[in-house]
Amino acid sequence: MTTFANACTHEALFGATEDRIDGGEWATPQDFYAKLNAEFHFTLDAAASHSNAKCAKYFTKDSDSLSQPWEGAVFCNPPYGRTIGDWLAKGRLEASKGALVVFLVHARTDTRWFHEHVYHVADEIRFIKGRLKFEHKDGTKQSAPFPSMVVIYRPKTEACTPEGCTCIKITKENNVR
């Protein structure tokens, strides 16, 4: 029999986590992050909480990361819900301004956001073998019920504006500029 706590944990990993009462905060596994950080030397965690930030400089939900400039080498494990396309669009925009942006997201290749912001758009996609074990803010750990991928947007050197750039798509769903 599934307990209520286990059902909620399962739901948080499957559902739109930013809509949950507890915020659905699942920290990036530290060993996985350490390997990425050794390669990219991150200076900003764009989607963190005070308890799970991976960099000295980080944005929390209250900081409204999507309205802040992202500079340097940016790590982002965004909320896995309806706004994920907005996060990827923001990462693309910031890469067009010179930032290196690395996302950890679920590998949902059938979604609109994947086809608009990742497939044939990202500089690199790394599919993760196996399932990552995320840690909830209450300390519990659980393997994700989905595959994960790392999406990399490298800094762009050419002039790029939202009106005339192939690296940024402006849509009704994500009005990121």
Image (tube, grey):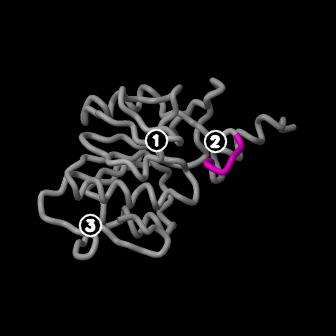
Q: Residues within 10 Å of mark 3 (few under 14, many from 20)?
A: many
C-alpha gap between disc 1 and disc 3: 22 Å
Which circle's residue, 1 or 2, is located before the other in the chain? 2
The amino acid type, in three-letter code, at marker 2 is: Gly
Screen quadrant of the C terminus: bottom left
163 left or right of 12 in image: left
Q: Residues within 10 Å of mark 1 (few under 14, many from 20)?
A: many
80 left or right of 85 in image: right
Question: Which residue has dot 1 on it?
Answer: 47
- Report x, y in % for residue 95: 25, 54
Please state which of the two labelled residues, at mark 1 or mark 3, is closer to the viewer.
1
C-alpha gap between disc 3 and disc 2: 31 Å
The amino acid type, in three-letter code, at marker 3 is: Cys
- Report x, y in % for residue 104: 42, 45
SS of the residue under disc 1:
loop
Most common secondary structure along the magenta stretch: helix
Against 18, residue 44 (above or below) is above
Residue 173 drawn in magenta: no
Residue found at x 48% / y 30%: 29
Front in this rendered view, residue 77 or 65: 65
Question: Which residue has dot 2 on it?
Answer: 23
- Report x, y in % for residue 98: 20, 51
Question: Which residue has dot 3 on it?
Answer: 167
Image: magenta residue range: 17-21
